[in-house]
Amino acid sequence: MHRSPLPHAERGGIGLIAGAALLWGTVGVTTQSLYQLSATNALSIGFFRLALAAPVLLLTCALLYGRAWRLQARDIRVAVLLGALMAVYQVAYFTAISYTGVTIAVLVTLCTAPVIAALLGGLLLRERMSRVVALALAGALLGTGLLVGVRPAGAEAGRLVIGVLFALASALGYASITVCGRLLGPQARPLEVNAVAFSVGALLLLAGTLPVGLATSYTPLSWGLLLYMGLVPTALAYMLFLAGMRRTTATIATLITLLEPLTGALLAWALFGERLAPLSLVGATLLLLSLGLLVWRPTAEPRAKPVEVEV
């Protein structure tokens, strides 16, 4: 049967979301490069990422909406909560990379987070957990176990376990953002929510650096990488994603964002020579399949409205 091509607007939306996912996929290798080039820490990297992106989002809101912000007091409180969760997610994610490398940290964090979000939705919001979601959860747990159980060349088992625990903590923070974001009112603009959340997250991370000190001694290349991380795979990528979401469905958007963990893993292999053992590859495949199950759930299954909060 002949299928009509996608409308031009939808094709454009797919391209924008794919571009955002590809940019997000560069965060892991950028973080690893910063660790290799400078004496930095996860708190400092997270702070600079959000602190550089927040003014861009605030300025964009000012240009688009002027003083006509629609965030109500309740939505502002939710945005503050999202900012706190974003700070936790950032620190745990960047810490995981320092222990496990990019590939495992990216796969565990990004592939288990949607599964954990579905589990939290069932526990906290009393959303029905179907057999498909339960199967995805089992596959994600098994995939993570295979990644942990097979030690990559040159890695210490203890560091690997610690890194995966941080990756799971990051996934929990990521999932909590998705679940808590559902508390936002229908009138809340995603751009405004993110502008507030990024600002709050940056302030919290700045406060968190006080006991250990904010790392500010960077080489020019490292400053360039920090600037890139804040402006390109954060502020710009979010705007691309938001523009793309207006032209395509949430299901297609979720499917396209699978490019993010795949991009991260491929870049880690190309730039840092990170390779997975055969059983670890099986685990990585299970994680991706588990995420895919959530995307291709039967349409009769109730799905929560997606929250456009980029992390």
Image: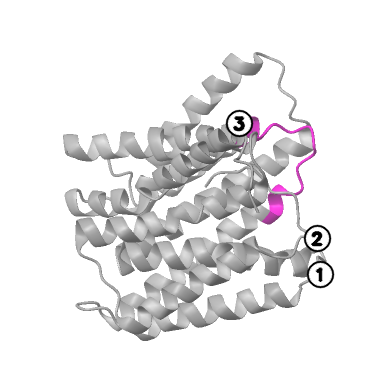
SS category of the residue bearing label 2? loop
Q: Badge 1: few (under 14), some or many (20 or more) residues near its Cα, within 10 Å?
A: some
- Counting from the top left corner in percent of width and height, residue 16 is at 50, 36
Dots 1 and 2: beta carbons under 8 Å?
yes
Residue 281 against residue 300 in the figure, above or below: below
User: In the figure, 290 relative to 205: above or below?
Assistant: below
Q: Image point 75% across, 25% down: which residue? A: 70
Residue at the spot 47% in from the left edge and 77% down from the top edge: 144
Quickly name the residue at label 2: 302
Q: Hey, which residue is sitting farthest front in the picture?
A: 1
Q: Secondary structure at mark 3?
A: helix
Task: Please indicate, yes or no, whether residue 218 appears anywhere in the rendered image.
Answer: no
Query: Which amino acid is tagged 3?
Result: Ala
Q: Which amino acid type corresponds to the residue marked 2 in the rendered image?
A: Pro
In this view, the mark in front (3 or 2): 3
At mark 1, the secondary structure is loop
Q: CA distance from mark 1 to mark 2?
A: 8 Å
Which residue is denoted by mark 1 in the rendering?
128
Residue type at mark 1 is: Arg
User: In this picture, which residue range is highlighted in magenta?
Assistant: 179-194
Relative horizontal placement of residue 170, taking residue 8 as reference (left or right): left
Q: Which mark is residue 9?
A: 3
Camera-side residue of 62 and 277 = 277
**Are the residues at dot 3 and dot 2 in contact (C-beta closer than 8 Å)?**
no
